[in-house]
Image (tube, helix red, strand yellow):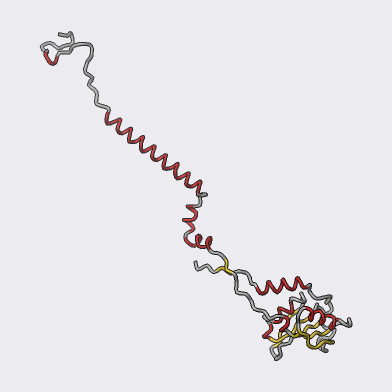
Amino acid sequence: MSMLTPPGMGGQYRITGDKYPRMRRPRRRARRVLAVVATLTVLGTAGWGTLQLIDVFSGGDGDKASAAGPKADCATKASPSPGAAKVLPEPRRITVNVFNATTRAGLAKQTADELKKRGFRIGDVGNAAAEFDKKVKGIGLLLGPASARDTALPVLAAQLTGAEPRTDAARKDTTLDLVIGDRFRTLTPTTTAAQTLTNLKTPPPTDKSTC
């Protein structure tokens, strides 16, 4: 019997050898808790990293787009549509009377000949009436009926940049008058006049978004 065996105890209670029982609680529960915590930490870190990668490759605009709402998305997708083309009469359908209100002789005929080369029909050519003679200080006046405001007058105005267009509601015929003023030098170059007419016929695009 070992010296460590209490008196009166023997048999199965006998302590033999050099190993002794350890009276400690098992560590299995603590190890399980630590394993769960470690797993959750790894999963959380992996999830955060995944979100960061998504944000980088998407440009970081996901939250902004969500905050802006459907209107911002619609504005991005909306594209302008061409405006309706404006119909203007051809020069051959416009009759122009050319009058000289300056002291320079020959301007009316010279200008009328140039307009004829550009396709206009020429009516009366001569000196301006008393109400305009030597009283037009600008480049010139363009006179016509109210119906020509957005049709024939813009076509003629393209040939004489800076001229003042006027309409007369009492005027019944469809002819136009070009009254040459003191500042007149020459008609607008044909290429510039043609570009002006193109711009008039093709208005800027309009946005047809229904958002």
Where is 150 relative to 42, above or below?
Answer: below
**201 with respect to 61 (left or right):** right
Nearer to us in this view, 49 or 195: 195
Percent of width and height locating residue 119:
76, 80
Q: Is residue 33 left or right of residue 183?
A: left
Which quadrant of the structure image shows residue 31? top left
Q: Is residue 197 left or right of residue 132?
A: left
Q: Nearer the viewer, residue 116 or 13?
A: 116
Which residue is located at x 17 percent, y 13 percent? 15
What residue lies at 84% left-to-right and 79% top-to-bottom? 182
Q: Residue 155: x, y in percent?
A: 72, 78
**Residue 3, position in %: x, y?**
17, 8
- The quarter of the picture where residue 32 lies is top left
Res. 45 image quadrant: top left
Which one is nearer the viewer's eye here, 117 or 170? Answer: 117
The residue shown at (73%, 73%) is: 194
8 over 167 or under it: above or below: above
Residue 95 place in picture, x, y as percent: 75, 85
